[in-house]
Amino acid sequence: MTETHDDLKSTVKNLSPVRRELEIELSATETAKTYDEMVQEFSGRAKLPGFRPGKAPVAVVLQKFGHDIEHEVIDHLIPEVLHRALQLNGIRAVGVPSVENVSFEAGGPLKFKAVVETWPEFELPAYLGLKLKKRVPLVGEDEIDKTIEDLRRKQAEYVPVESRGIQNGDYVVALVQGRDLKTKRLLPAEKAIVLVGHERNDPAINEHLLGLRTAEEKAFEYAYPPDFQNKKFSGKTIAYTLKVQTVKEMIFPEVNDELAKHLGEFETLDALRAKIREELTVTKAQYALRETSQEAVQAVIGPAKIELPETMVEEEMESVLKNIASQLPRQGISREAAETIRARAREQAEQNLKEHLVIRKIAQAEGFEVTEADLDEEIKTIATSNGLPLARVMDTFQEEGRRDGLKSTLLARRTIDFLVSRAIME
């Protein structure tokens, strides 16, 4: 396809559903205007022997800087000309175009080739009447019991222990001093706060605290295995001395009406259980809706044939990787694990982009829009639910991109809610 518009000629070739190759030519008449401007600019600032600044003849300036001027013309014109050619051909490019085969000499046209990526065009599969799994948010008695037990444990009192030795489950404060038997090096003394018996404790301390009483001391040696996870101690034998400073046990309240009254405005345990059931039902309903919404999106994406521009996949993948990296341990990971993570990040990036494209296309097909009033109302909701001043939250969403991001989120939510509302639950 060739498009000509006054002084600009462009030919477009489809390399793939998301890649276009443009051969572009800007007429010599148009390039001459920019060339003359560049000549004047160079003449005005050129410093040449025998001439005052800005007074050198054009011929001398061209002889000295002709090649540089041509490059300046190319650098100045290509972005502008490429933008015009894309508009002329109705192409919405993504990422950074690749430019090659540039040709320009003074007095002649500017010619070059550009390869750009675009968002794909695709047909929407049927999205009305999707068959989705019916999810009923049921709450079992065991879940209520577990919630009450968690609340009960949070109400525990820490009572000093004097009449017995240390047991698993006690909280202990002890002074610990170690010495490497091989190097004779003394390790720094530490005040350790230990939940006795916890699996993450140093096994040496865990084992030798049992049975001790407040103010008692103990000396012992412990040989760490070569594969011990803390490399500071792996394969070493350490001589320890420890002194117990305090021992406390957790005393839990009984599960009865008194516990219910202590936890809030509940006269009886049954009232507390009813409130917990209500809150768990709401939470489960929200979770069920999220699962159903994701199922609806997948049901549309699955049959859709969408080829993605590599530029955008790479960009989204880097965003996914940053999020993953923030959750990884600081000591690093193996090369094999890194490759696995990168592959999964790419899958997630492709999934994210397909969701975005499909949801946006459905929103367009249904004529959904998010107004400024909708945005303001959502910001009010965010402020209220987080207990923040409205003015402060409003200012936050005035930052670059934040309001547009919220708009995209609301549009996606509205579209997905529409899919679910028109689905058939089985």
Image: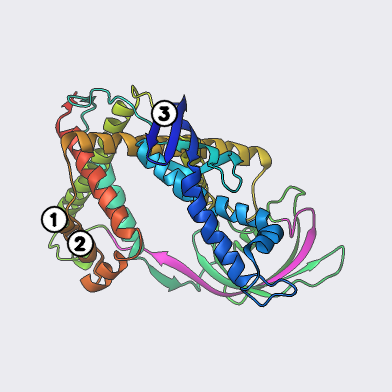
The reply to whether the C-beta atoms of the residues labelled 1 and 2 are less than 8 Å apart is yes
Residue type (three-letter) at the residue carrying disc 3: Thr
Estimate the x, y position of residue 350 in percent, counting from the top left: 44, 35
Q: Are marks 3 and 1 in contact (CB under 8 Å)?
A: no
Q: Quadrant of residue 177?
A: bottom right
Mark number for residue 195? Answer: none
Please, what is the three-letter code of the amino acid marked with disc 2? Ala
Density class for disc 2 (Cα within 10 Å; few <14, some 14-19, many ≥20) is many
Q: CA distance from mark 1 to mark 2?
A: 8 Å
User: In this view of the protein, can residue 90 be seen by the observer?
Assistant: yes
Q: Main secondary structure of the magenta part?
A: strand
Helix, strand or loop for disc 3: strand
Q: Position of residue 164 (x, y in %)?
A: 52, 67
Left or right of 366, for residue 229: right
Q: Which residue is mark 1?
A: 271
Element carrying mark 1: helix
Alpha carbon of mark 2 to alpha carbon of mark 3: how far?
78 Å
Of 399 and 260, the residue lying toward us? 399
Residue indicated by mark 2? 260
Q: Is residue 251 magenta?
A: yes
Quarter occupied by the N terminus: top left
Q: Earlier in the sequence, mark 3 or mark 1?
A: 3
Residue span colored magenta: 231-254
Q: Crowding at label 1, few (<14), some or many (≥20) Cα neighbours within 10 Å? A: some
Q: Is residue 362 left or right of residue 326?
A: left
Q: Does residue 392 sit above or below 21 in this rendering?
A: below
Please tell me the numbered disc located at residue 2.
3
Crowd around label 3: few <14 · some 14–19 · many ≥20 (10 Å): few
Relative vertical location of residue 397 with respect to residue 186 in this rendering, above or below: above
Quadrant in which residue 421 is drawn: top left
User: Label 3, label 1: how many angstroms apart (C-alpha)?
Assistant: 76 Å
Residue type highlighted by circle 1: Ala
